Image (spheres, rainbow, N blue to C red):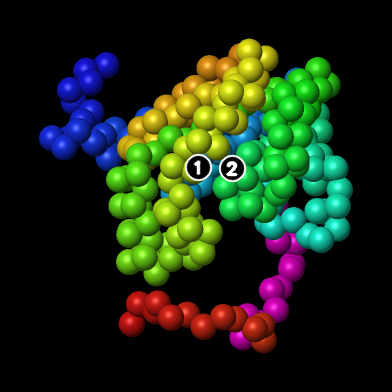
């Protein structure tokens, strides 16, 4: 590959290359999906990182062409009062995959080591108990046959601010900004320290953190998908194209008048 031909003058990937490469990688993801289904694999992928680091964009590109019955996304909200009284990992267990499934967690049990720690939503005792218990919990999942993959999306303070400003200006993205996001801007160092402490305890040989340089969204998406495909050995189980038989005749069937049905208005008539 001639890398000079895939970059624009500003160092960004050319859109034509990005779209072509993404399309090829998504074909490979479909092959991986079929392999997971055929072999009964259980795959869990965690996506963590700062607000506006690009986790959602990568998840969207991974799942875009996949079967939602095999590959599903879990993005849990604030714990209920009942869930707050449970064993911390309990609310995540029902979402773990059965054989032949891949589950993508858009934020996960690592909330306790990040936002809950920094914002004071958990006690020090709960926080340290999590850091001690988490490696054992993940080891238990792996021993049960789950393939557990953890991605941390790393974004610079300058790039995060740029994305926050973009969300403010774009009505279709403004919902992505929450009071928690705005608070995180003022606690950059606190989040950095929390991430470092989290890595000290949970970046293990059996279940390491894979860090994604996420300042360039398009490169981050391609690099993450390529890396994911490299972690699970799979074979192409794509079935041969089906040959469609000739369509059967209507056999005297008469369709009811379409005017009798509740049609939605056509706002785009070609007058």
Specify the segment rendered in magenta. 244-259
**The one of 151 and 244 positioned closer to us in this rendering:** 151
Who is closer to the viewer here, 116 or 65?
A: 116
The residue at 58%/17% (across/down) is 231
Question: Please, which residue is most extreme toward the left here?
Answer: 9
Q: Quadrant of the N terminus?
A: top left
The residue positioned 51% from the left and 83% from the top of the image is: 265
Residue 209 counted in the magenta span: no
Above or below, 175 relative to 135: below
Q: Is residue 251 magenta?
A: yes
**Quick check: 41 above or below 18?**
above
Element type at mark 2: loop
Q: Is residue 261 visible?
A: yes
Report the number of discs. Answer: 2
Residue extending farthest to the front is 124
Name the residue at 39% across, 69% down.
171
* Separation of marks 1 and 2 at Cα, in angstroms: 7 Å
The residue to which callout 1 is attached is 191
| Residue 156 against residue 204 in the figure, above or below | below
**Can the viewer see residue 40 in this picture?**
no
Residue ID for mark 2: 114
- Estimate the x, y position of residue 62 in percent, counting from the top left: 53, 38
On the image, which quarter does residue 203 sit in? top right
């Amino acid at each position: 590959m001639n890398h000079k031909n895939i970059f624009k003058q500003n160092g960004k990937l050319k859109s034509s290359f990005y779209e072509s490469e993404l399309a090829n990688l998504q074909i490979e993801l479909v092959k991986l999906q079929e392999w997971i289904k055929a072999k009964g694999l259980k795959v869990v992928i965690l996506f963590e990182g700062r607000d506006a680091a690009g986790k959602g964009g990568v998840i969207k590109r991974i799942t875009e062409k996949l079967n939602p019955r095999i590959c599903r996304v879990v993005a849990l909200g604030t714990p209920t009062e009942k869930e707050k009284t449970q064993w911390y990992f309990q609310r995540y267990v029902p979402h773990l995959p059965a054989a032949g499934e891949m589950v993508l967690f858009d934020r996960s049990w690592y909330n306790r080591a990040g936002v809950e720690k920094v914002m004071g939503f958990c006690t020090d005792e709960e926080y340290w108990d999590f850091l001690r218990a988490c490696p054992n919990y993940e080891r238990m999942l792996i021993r049960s046959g789950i393939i557990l993959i953890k991605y941390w999306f790393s974004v610079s303070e300058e790039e995060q601010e740029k994305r926050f400003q973009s969300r403010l200006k774009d009505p279709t993205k403004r919902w992505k900004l929450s009071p928690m996001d705005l608070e995180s801007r003022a606690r950059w160092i606190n989040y950095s320290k929390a991430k470092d402490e989290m890595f000290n305890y949970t970046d293990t040989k059996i279940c390491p953190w894979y860090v994604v340089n996420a300042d360039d969204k398009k490169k981050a998406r391609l690099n993450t998908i390529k890396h994911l495909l490299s972690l699970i050995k799979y074979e192409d189980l794509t079935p041969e194209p089906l040959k469609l038989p000739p369509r059967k005749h209507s056999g005297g069937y008469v369709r009811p008048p379409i005017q009798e049905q509740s049609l939605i208005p056509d706002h785009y008539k070609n007058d």
